[in-house]
Image: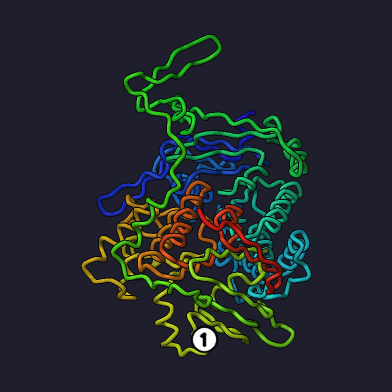
Amino acid sequence: MNATDHIIHASGLVKIYKVAELEVVALQGLDLEVARGEFLALVGPSGSGKSTLLNAIGGLDRPSAGQLIVDGLDLTALTPAQLSAYRRERVGFIWQQTTRNLLPYLSARENIELLMTFAGRSGRERRAWANELLEAVGMAEKASTPVTQLSGGQQQRVAIACALANQPRILLGDEPTGELDWDTAQRVLALLRDLRTRYGLTIVLVTHDPRVAEQADRVIAIRDGRTSTETRRDDGKTSGDEVSAAAGRSGRARAAEELVVVDRAGRLQIPSDQRALAGIGRRARVELVDGGILIRPVEDDRIAIPTEEPTSDQHHHYLYEDDVSPVTSPAAPAAPLIEVRGVTRVFGAGIRAVHALRGVDLTIERSAFVALVGPSGSGKTTLLNIIGGLDRPTSGSVVIEGRRIDQMTPDELTRLRRQMGFIFQSFALLPTSSAFENVELALRLTRRAPRHQWDARVRRVLAAVGLTDWTNHRPYELSGGQQQRVALARALVTSPRIILADEPTGDLDSRTGRRVLTMLRTLCDQEGVTLIMASHDPAVLEFASSIYHMRDGVIIGCEQGVTAR
């Protein structure tokens, strides 16, 4: 493939963030080439540099060193005004949180036309192109609907139309299906492939979902700020008509081969599982043999082959030690912790009324791990908000430990919420406060521990979620997955007996997500914590004790999950 076939060319890309005296190297000499018309997925653990790379390609951030050429432009040499024109004319963005994609007080059409207004398009041009985009994304019938009355999948379709408003050549997505159920996510991915064929787009997506990555022509794994491995599909045909033809074959099995990437300096990253199984430690022998290069361990530096990670409770039991005394269950059978009876929730009125919940009945026992699953817009988040006292039902009752919270005064609700832990889908972190300060804030507000214990408790929960080295970083200096873990630590630091979690693993890679789920299940089993989680993550089903399926504001089914781990 010729260099002219590459719409994105990155060479030796470095990005360094400076926080006081501390430097964080997010990209460490990264090399990348993307073909015109290619569908590329970027994967890797939280904090590996995926979103940093995407921001650099999108002109939202400048690399500290290296070369970055996109569509013939050297982004490192552009002025701020030129970068603004580049972002407006050549790239479109789709974010995971719809609040970053759309203005909630505008309709679908108005959101699309607003972006064209900024670009100086005439009224006739705006209407014609908005009509075509709404038709292309299957939202023509919802053109005049305020985005707050659309489901998550519908909002993401409108967001895609907004990303294409100024006819960009490149479409960048940061976890664009992260908040969608898999059926809706598949429809969004099929839409992206269709739009690529129709408008000749190059698509680059960041994702933690291996099912999403499988839909791409090529998958680049990033680790520690460098490209680590590359997986090609369909015999590596990633350009021209072959790319378009491959787009229609997503439903069938596609041949794939994972290759280790060798950078311009000859460096490579051996996959950690292969390195561990080979016993390779800090040093290795490299030998030239017939047909290739052999890498073998040094005998005096060989590491032991690891066994399976222990799944006992010893890792996370300490989280609640020395904390506020837990509410112990009586010896006799206790009443359910939470009872939801006939709950409805209606937003708006008249013909614009949206029935988010329609007569929901739900009983939750103490120490349960309850999963709420269902398509986007099924009412999962609304139900969580009502149970947590963040919203009131239109009708029906919610009883927690024998008290009707739907009849509580605002002050009583505040005291109730201080006994709960909340993990919000949008993180809800204070942008100017560090990870440590965001977590400590929960203790300051609830006063659920003596002041002299705060420092130790905050550091303990941050260590439990793998953020020991990031305590002094502010949210904008953290990846989405790291921000998710700060939100999790904040929910745990007060030792709550009830935790309400909205997509807590949505921004985490699969390995980190399973570690978080293991920790949460351990707290349920060993500390008597009750967890209610809304999620699209299929891994949650392996940990939940009860699984409730929701659709159109109704619980349509319940199944028992894992009783003990």
Q: Say few, some or many: other residues with alpha carbon within 10 Å of mark 1 (under 14 / 14 to 19 / 20 or more).
A: some
**Depicted 451 relative to depicted 255: above or below:** below
**Depicted 288 relative to depicted 222: above or below:** above
| Quarter that holds the N terminus | top right
Pinpoint residue 5: horizontal percent, then vertical percent. 64, 34
Residue situated in front as seen by the camera: 254 or 147? 254
Residue situated in front as seen by the camera: 272 or 482? 272
Q: Residue, x 32% and y 56% (percent of image)? A: 471
Badge 1 is on which residue?
A: 404
Pinpoint residue 116: horizontal percent, then vertical percent. 64, 64
Q: Residue, x 69% and y 35% (percent of image)? A: 239
Q: Amino acid at mark 1?
A: Arg
Horizontal arrangement in the rendering, residue 244 relative to residue 53 (left or right): right
Q: Does residue 249 appear anywhere in the picture? A: yes
Q: Does residue 112 appear anywhere in the picture? A: no
Horizontal arrangement in the rendering, residue 459 relative to residue 551 (left or right): left
Pinpoint residue 94: horizontal percent, then vertical percent. 60, 57
Pinpoint residue 296: horizontal percent, then vertical percent. 43, 19
Q: Disc 1 on helix, strand or loop?
A: strand
